[in-house]
Image (spheres, coloured by chain):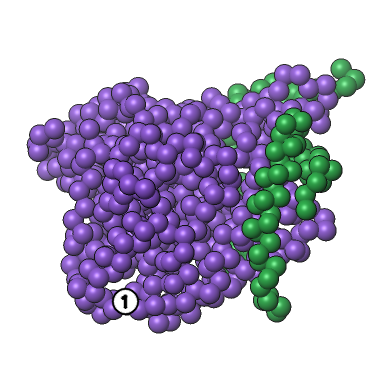
Chain colours: A green, B purple
């Protein structure tokens, strides 16, 4: 149901590096969990609307007024690496 | 411990004693701070170094200055907020969650941050990057999860009361396993602003307390006017009042066969049935009700919650905060290596599960169907509430299990949520109250059991009132866990 190729494909989508051992584990564990999950395939759900949000709320609006936001330096304090006024990331050209 | 110790006071009693002038809020904070510092259960990820100096606690503040333990995943300015994850180790946010701010303003200062399963994914607190937490009734057993640190801290008398979050049972199940009260409010009742997200359509903050009155008092300052910073937050239609009911005359309990039979430990089921009898004696009617789709709730939940989590956790990429892998050659490697090193096994499993369920070709079969099951479950509850005031069931299928017993089998761990997930999917409030002790299968020292009541959206006042009447009649004594 879930093979090695699928695990590697999904890991790429999730931007998640997996070790060889983790790939093997995922093949077994995800397969077993999906076996249980697939019991919902037995239900007759024709014509049933999907629920994404349980409480009925529509068009929650507020006045569009500027409010103070966190100072740049306070936000950058949490960053693992900064460059000038921004977040630094590795560049192959650097 | 003498009967005059402030440790024997519930949070309501302590707040009243402070207001009368019989107890000093600073002394109470210091008493609990010392106990939390000496904690041997690993219930905490951070403990305050001293009582907050400014602004001084007003003894007439509604919550009196009774200190509060807060689950790690609530953002607290300048204080580590790591959601139990290596990827956020040492992260001190620049702002505080709305609910923590509201409670501090009402007179519940921050005492400590509590241990939890990583990103609230788990039912045992064993998935924390900062080590597992012990159950105060038996340190070799789990406290439940994901709010296991909050539950253990309150049960052991290391904190007067605590905040947790519940996505599929993460307040109610640990409360049950530790012998305390845990309430999951109606979805939207409490602001999620500043809560590090797991599954946004399900996450809800709530109290973990020694008794029902404490839960009501804490909740009364968590709800109210909606928070403009959380678009799903709602005005609560009425103030939360302290419960006072002593009988159950005219109250109709529905008992769903689907959640009170197969898979429930005999000791838990025995305690549940004894409490149904007690409810009858107090005047309640107790009749079977049907939640035909409840057995499928777990399967739907384990599609929806991981799907939302896989999206929410995309933000942890090593760029703006938290851990960053050192060996990345380019931006893609920065993401993939950071997430490989920073996430634990269960988080990786759920990110994979959720990404798979949302991926092209599988979306309709998994996510789309799970959303339709969710509709059916909400309809089941609506039909039940046309006939009954509350639906009642055990909180957890079993008592606390031994540390390590279920870590090798993810689905066995997921089954802990069997009785709590249906109310989560329906977004309705549910409370777990201590329902005595029961021996684990195969015998051994008796351990706490929970009794769960679920009501319609915004029925918190009635839910608390009925839970209070049952609590008084049950007379549970949790003092053995406070040593």
Left or right: B445 in relation to B294: left
Question: Taking B10 as reference, is A48 above or below it?
Answer: below
Which residue is the extreme one toward the right?
A: A93
Question: Taking B470 as reference, is B148 above or below it?
Answer: above
Question: Taking A17 as reference, is B207 above or below it?
Answer: below
Which residue is the extreme one toward the front?
A: B442
**Residue nearer the viewer, B453 or B260:** B260
Q: Let me know if residue B241 appears in the view.
A: no
Pinpoint the chain carrying mark 1: B
Question: Taking B439 as reference, is B96 above or below it?
Answer: above
- The residue depicted at 21 percent of the width and 59 percent of the height is B474
Q: Let me know if residue B177 appears in the view.
A: yes
Which residue is the extreme one toward the bottom?
A: B387
> Secondary structure beneath disc 1?
strand
**Residue that label 1 marks:** B286
Residue B183 picture location, percent across and down: 38, 55
- Badge 1 crowding class, 10 Å Cα cut-off, few under 14, some 14 to 19, many 20 or more, is some
- The residue depicted at 38 percent of the width and 34 percent of the height is B140
- The residue depicted at 58 percent of the width and 65 percent of the height is B296
Number of marks present in the image shown: 1
Q: Quadrant of the N terminus of chain B?
A: top left
Left or right: B358 in relation to B161: right
Q: Quadrant of the C terminus of chain B?
A: top left
Residue B379 picture location, percent across and down: 54, 75
Residue B440 picture location, percent across and down: 35, 48
**Residue nearer the viewer, A14 or B465:** A14
- The residue depicted at 66 percent of the width and 39 percent of the height is B348
Residue B302 picture location, percent across and down: 61, 55
């Amino acid at each position: 149901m879930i093979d090695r190729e699928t695990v590697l494909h999904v890991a790429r989508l999730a931007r998640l590096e997996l070790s060889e051992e983790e790939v093997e584990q995922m093949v077994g564990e995800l397969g077993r969990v999906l076996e249980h999950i697939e019991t919902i395939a037995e239900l007759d759900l024709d014509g049933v609307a999907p629920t994404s949000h349980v409480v009925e709320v529509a068009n929650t609006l507020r006045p569009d007024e500027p409010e103070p936001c966190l100072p740049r330096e306070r936000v950058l304090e949490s960053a693992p690496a900064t460059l000038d006024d921004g977040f630094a990331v590795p560049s192959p050209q650097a | 411990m003498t009967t005059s110790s402030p440790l024997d006071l519930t949070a309501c009693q302590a707040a009243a004693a402070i207001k009368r002038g019989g107890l000093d809020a600073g002394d109470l904070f210091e008493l609990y701070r010392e106990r939390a510092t000496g904690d041997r259960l690993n219930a905490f990820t951070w403990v305050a170094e001293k009582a907050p100096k400014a602004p001084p606690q007003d003894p007439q503040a509604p919550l009196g200055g009774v200190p509060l333990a807060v689950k790690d995943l609530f953002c607290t300015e300048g204080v580590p907020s790591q959601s139990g994850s290596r990827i956020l180790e040492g992260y001190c946010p620049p702002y505080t969650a709305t609910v923590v701010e509201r409670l501090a303003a009402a007179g519940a200062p921050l005492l400590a941050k509590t241990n939890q399963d990583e990103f609230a994914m788990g039912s045992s607190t064993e998935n924390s990057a900062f080590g597992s937490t012990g159950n105060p009734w038996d340190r070799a057993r789990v406290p439940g999860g994901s709010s296991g640190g909050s539950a253990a801290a309150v049960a052991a008398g290391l904190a007067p009361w605590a905040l947790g979050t519940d996505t599929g049972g993460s307040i109610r199940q640990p409360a049950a396993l530790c012998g305390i009260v845990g309430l999951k409010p109606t979805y939207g009742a409490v602001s999620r602003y500043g809560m590090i997200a797991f599954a946004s359509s399900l996450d809800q903050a709530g109290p973990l307390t020694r008794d029902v009155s404490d839960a009501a008092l804490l909740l009364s300052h968590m709800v109210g006017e909606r928070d403009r910073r959380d678009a799903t937050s709602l005005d609560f239609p009425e103030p939360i009042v302290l419960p006072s009911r002593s009988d159950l005359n005219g109250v109709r309990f529905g008992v769903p066969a689907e959640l009170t039979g197969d898979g429930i430990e005999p000791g838990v089921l025995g305690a549940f049935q004894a409490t149904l009898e007690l409810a009858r004696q107090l005047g309640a009617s107790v009749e079977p009700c049907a939640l035909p789709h409840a057995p499928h709730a777990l399967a739907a939940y384990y599609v929806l919650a991981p799907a939302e989590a896989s999206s929410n956790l995309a933000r942890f990429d090593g760029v703006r905060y938290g851990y960053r892998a050192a060996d990345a050659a380019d931006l893609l490697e920065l993401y993939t290596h950071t997430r490989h090193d920073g996430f634990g096994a269960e988080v990786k499993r759920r990110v994979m599960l959720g990404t798979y369920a949302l991926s092209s070709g599988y979306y309709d079969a998994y996510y789309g169907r799970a959303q339709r099951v969710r509709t059916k479950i909400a309809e089941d509850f609506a039909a039940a509430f046309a006939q009954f005031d509350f639906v009642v069931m055990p909180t957890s299928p079993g008592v606390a299990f031994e540390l390590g017993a279920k870590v090798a089998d993810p689905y066995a761990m997921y089954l802990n949520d069997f009785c709590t997930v249906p109310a989560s999917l329906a977004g309705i409030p549910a409370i777990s109250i201590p329902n005595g002790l029961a021996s684990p299968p195969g015998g051994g020292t008796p351990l706490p059991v929970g009794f769960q009541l679920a009501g319609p959206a915004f029925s918190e006042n009635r839910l608390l009132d009925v839970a209070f009447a049952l609590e008084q009649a049950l007379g549970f004594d949790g003092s053995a866990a406070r040593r």
